[in-house]
Image: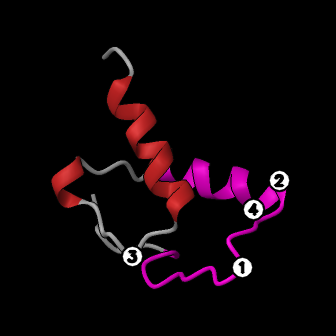
Amino acid sequence: MSSHGPFDEYIDTTGLVDVIEEVRLRTWARLNYHSPEERNRKWHPIILDEMRRRDTETV
């Protein structure tokens, strides 16, 4: 898995995204899942949230 993606340096100053952007971010997070210790803390909060959700899913 690559640790680089389209959202590596993404900073959302408004904290708001539309529904389509949220789906795009969550899809990217699912397809590019990283374990907690491999995650970039600069990734968008929605990406990190989706990865945390996947952490809790049964394998």
Q: Which residue is mark 3?
A: 42
Q: Which residue is mark 4?
A: 21
Q: Position of residue 34 (x, y in %)?
A: 29, 51
Work out whether mark 1 precedes mark 4 in sequence or the reverse, and give the earlier one.
1
SS label for mark 2: helix
| Count of numbered badges drawn on the protein | 4
Q: Which residue is mark 2?
A: 19
The residues bearing labels 1 and 4 have C-alpha atoms spaced at a distance of 14 Å
Please identify, in this view, whether the residue under mark 3 or under mark 1 is nearer the observer: 1
Work out whether mark 4 precedes mark 3 in sequence or the reverse, and give the earlier one.
4
Q: Which residue is mark 1?
A: 14
Q: Residue furthest left?
A: 37
Q: Which residues are magenta?
A: 6-29
Residue flagged by tag 1: what amino acid is it?
A: Thr
Q: Residues within 10 Å of mark 3 (few under 14, many from 20)?
A: few
SS label for mark 1: loop
Residue flagged by tag 3: what amino acid is it?
A: Lys
Work out whether mark 2 precedes mark 3 in sequence or the reverse, and give the earlier one.
2
Quarter assignment of residue 41:
bottom left
Q: Residues within 10 Å of mark 2 (few under 14, many from 20)?
A: few
Work out whether mark 3 precedes mark 1 in sequence or the reverse, and give the earlier one.
1
Residue flagged by tag 2: what amino acid is it?
A: Val
